[in-house]
Structures are given as structure tokens and as C-alpha cells.
């Protein structure tokens, strides 16, 4: 039996990025009971955002008004997505959810369109790996059962 290197690589990627998201979620558990931590981060980003920028619009219209909801959804989403990727459960869906959460933070923080985004380990590597997992299927290959070959015993599949 030959090793499927591509599938093995994707399994390693989803496991590593899954562990990353689990620990990111664990670091934000406090947000469940204290949304002011996230509100403070939004206020800092809002002050630094250039007037009329996408970041400023997003913070004022979406993030800040929904801070109490995001303070609960983000840690929960990171924990569930991370766990799902580690065990390989609906990897494309949960990788896409993780991609959207990371993208939201980069838009809100104003880092998406800066050079530092390319050199930050939380930037391009996280977005690239989660998007790759969402598009690749997550490393699970399934064989299609086509029926019993001629002359093979009943119930035996090739």
C-alpha cells in the first residue's frame, strides 16, 4: 500500500492549524464573561483606523455594535473549528469558518492591507492554510464502491 503524500500533508496541516485555533479559543475564554476585553481591542483599532477605511466602516457598523455577540461567538467558533479540524470532522466547512473569523480580525485590525500582514504568522499563513483546507476537502479520501467484480465472492468489494 502506497502512502498518499498529498492526503498525509493535508492531514498534518489540518491537525496543526486545528491545534492553533483550539489554543487561540482557549486564550479568549474570558470574553464569555467579560466582553469589555474585546470592546477595548475594537476601540484601539478604531482609533488607529484611517478615516473612511474599510476597517473603520467595519468596526463602526458591524464589530462594535455586535461586541457582546462576537465576544461569545469568536472563542466558541475557534474552539469548535479547531477541534473539528483536529479530528477531521467536516473539515472544509470548519476551515472556512476559521478562515472567515481570521479574515474578520485582519479587516477590523486594519492589518490586511499592510506589509506586516505578509510577515506576521497570524496573517497569510493562517488565512492561506484555512482556505487551502476549505478547498481541498481536508485530507479524507473516499473510495467509490462500484460493485462486486465478476467472479468475486458475494459481498467482496474491490
Image: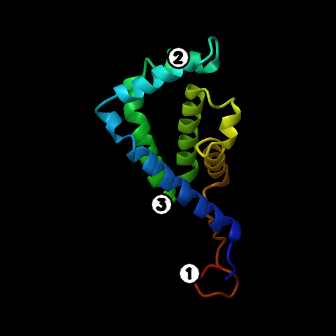
Choose the circle earlier in sequence order: 3 or 2: 2
How far apart marks 1 and 3 lie (CA) works out to: 30 Å
Point out residue 72 in the picture as x, y percentages from the top left corner: 37, 34
Q: Which residue is mark 2?
A: 47
Q: For the residue labelled by badge 1, is the local secondary structure a helix, a strand or a loop?
A: loop
Disc 1 target residue: 155
Q: Nearer the viewer, mark 1 or mark 3?
A: 3
Question: Where is residue 94 drawn, in percent x and y?
Answer: 52, 47
- Seen in the image, is 28 located left or right of residue 104? left
Determine whether the residue tagged by mark 2 lies in a helix, strand or loop: helix
Choose the circle earlier in sequence order: 2 or 1. Answer: 2
Give how far apart the Cα atoms at labels 2 and 1 are: 67 Å
Q: Going 59% across and 21% down the picture, which residue do you hit?
A: 55
Residue at (48, 22) in percent of width and height: 44
Within-10-Å neighbours for mark 3: few <14, some 14–19, many 20+: few
Quadrant including the C terminus: bottom right
Secondary structure found at label 3: helix
Rendering coords of residue 9 (x, y %) = 65, 64
**Mark 3 sits on what residue?**
87
Q: Earlier in the sequence, mark 1 or mark 3?
A: 3
Amino acid at each position: 500500500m502506497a502512502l498518499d503524500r498529498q492526503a498525509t500533508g493535508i492531514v498534518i496541516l489540518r491537525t496543526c492549524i486545528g491545534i492553533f485555533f483550539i489554543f487561540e479559543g482557549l486564550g479568549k475564554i474570558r470574553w464569555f464573561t467579560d466582553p469589555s476585553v474585546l470592546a477595548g481591542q475594537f476601540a484601539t483599532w478604531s482609533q488607529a483606523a484611517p478615516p473612511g477605511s474599510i476597517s473603520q466602516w467595519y468596526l463602526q457598523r458591524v464589530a462594535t455594535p455586535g461586541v457582546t455577540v462576537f465576544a461569545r461567538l469568536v472563542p466558541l467558533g475557534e474552539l469548535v473549528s479547531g477541534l473539528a479540524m483536529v479530528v477531521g470532522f467536516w473539515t472544509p466547512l470548519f476551515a472556512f469558518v476559521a478562515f472567515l473569523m481570521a479574515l474578520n480580525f485582519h479587516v477590523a485590525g486594519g492589518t490586511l492591507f499592510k506589509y506586516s500582514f505578509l510577515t506576521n504568522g497570524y496573517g497569510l499563513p493562517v488565512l492561506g492554510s484555512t482556505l487551502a483546507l476549505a478547498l481541498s476537502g481536508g485530507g479524507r479520501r473516499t473510495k467509490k464502491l462500484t460493485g462486486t467484480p465478476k467472479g468475486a465472492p458475494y459481498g467482496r468489494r474491490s
